[in-house]
């Protein structure tokens, strides 16, 4: 795989699997006096996620966290496959793949930290944000020029949709 450009894998992708923290959000949490943790997500990512869903792409979220606000935001975009508090991400990834009957080469994964490395190695196209951990960047087929929470999700989705003729803009 290392010898090919990642672009050759875009045309096979029907399914996107994303981590939340550091991918759909930036790598920061704002801690309030009450101990609440606030995150920010890109509305530009959200728009394109919904657009891809409407085009028939599969969208799956696997996170080690349990942030209900982020979950509600993603549900509101129309995503139903959201798996929270999953620290063995590969197990969840393989269960999801099997439940949907997906081939490995159909699945693009984007993660930013160590827990994402096992599913990245089992996906057809392993991607990460610009500010991912160095160990993650080392196994990624594609490193976005954009950071977590700042459009990296939109970057990979639009690349796939353009190659597959689903981006009419
Ligand atoms: Mg993360």
Image (cartoon, grey):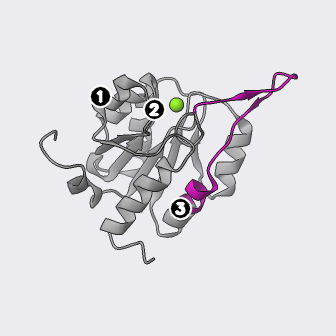
> What SS does tag 3 mark?
helix
Residue 112: assigned label: 2
In magenta stretch: residue 5:
no
Q: Which residue is mark 1?
A: 138
Q: How far from the left and from the top, in percent, is residue 132? A: 44, 31
Asked which quadrant contains residue 96, the reply is top left
Q: Position of residue 17 (x, y in %)?
A: 45, 45
Within the magenta stretch, is there residue 48?
yes
Q: Which region is colored magenta?
A: 27-49
Q: Are marks 3 and 2 in contact (CB under 8 Å)?
A: no
The label shown at residue 163 is none
- Return the residue at label 3: 48
Which residue occupies the foreground of this view, 144 or 10?
A: 144
Please report the residue visible at 42 percent of the width from the left and 61 percent of the height from the top: 158
Q: Position of residue 149 (x, y in %)?
A: 57, 43
50 vs 112, left or right, is: right
Q: Nearer the viewer, residue 11 or 87?
A: 11
The residue that appears at 56% across and 54% down in the rendered structure is 45
**Distance Cα–Cα, label 1 vs label 2:** 11 Å
- Extreme-left residue of the structure: 3
In which quadrant will I find the N terminus? top left
Which residue does the image show at 59% across and 62% down from the upper left?
A: 47
Tell me how far mark 1 sits from mark 3, CA to CA: 27 Å
Residue placed furthest toward the front: 145
Label 1 close to label 2 by CB (< 8 Å): no
Q: Nearer the viewer, residue 72 or 169?
A: 169
């Amino acid at each position: 795989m290392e010898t090919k450009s990642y672009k050759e894998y875009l045309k096979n992708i029907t399914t996107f699997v994303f981590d939340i923290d550091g991918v759909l959000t930036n790598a920061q949490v704002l801690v309030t006096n009450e101990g609440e943790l606030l995150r920010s997500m890109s509305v530009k990512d959200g728009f394109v996620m919904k657009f891809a869903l409407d085009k028939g792409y599969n969208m799956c979220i696997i996170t080690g966290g349990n942030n209900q606000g982020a979950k509600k935001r993603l549900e509101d975009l129309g995503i139903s496959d959201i798996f929270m508090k999953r620290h063995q991400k590969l197990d969840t990834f393989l269960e999801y793949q099997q439940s949907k009957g997906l081939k490995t080469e159909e699945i693009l994964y984007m993660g930013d930290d160590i827990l994402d490395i096992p599913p990245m190695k089992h996906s057809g196209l392993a991607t990460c944000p610009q500010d991912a951990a160095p160990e993650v960047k080392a196994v990624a087929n594609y490193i976005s020029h954009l950071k977590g929470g700042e459009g990296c999700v939109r970057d990979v989705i639009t690349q796939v949709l353009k190659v597959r003729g689903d981006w009419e803009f």
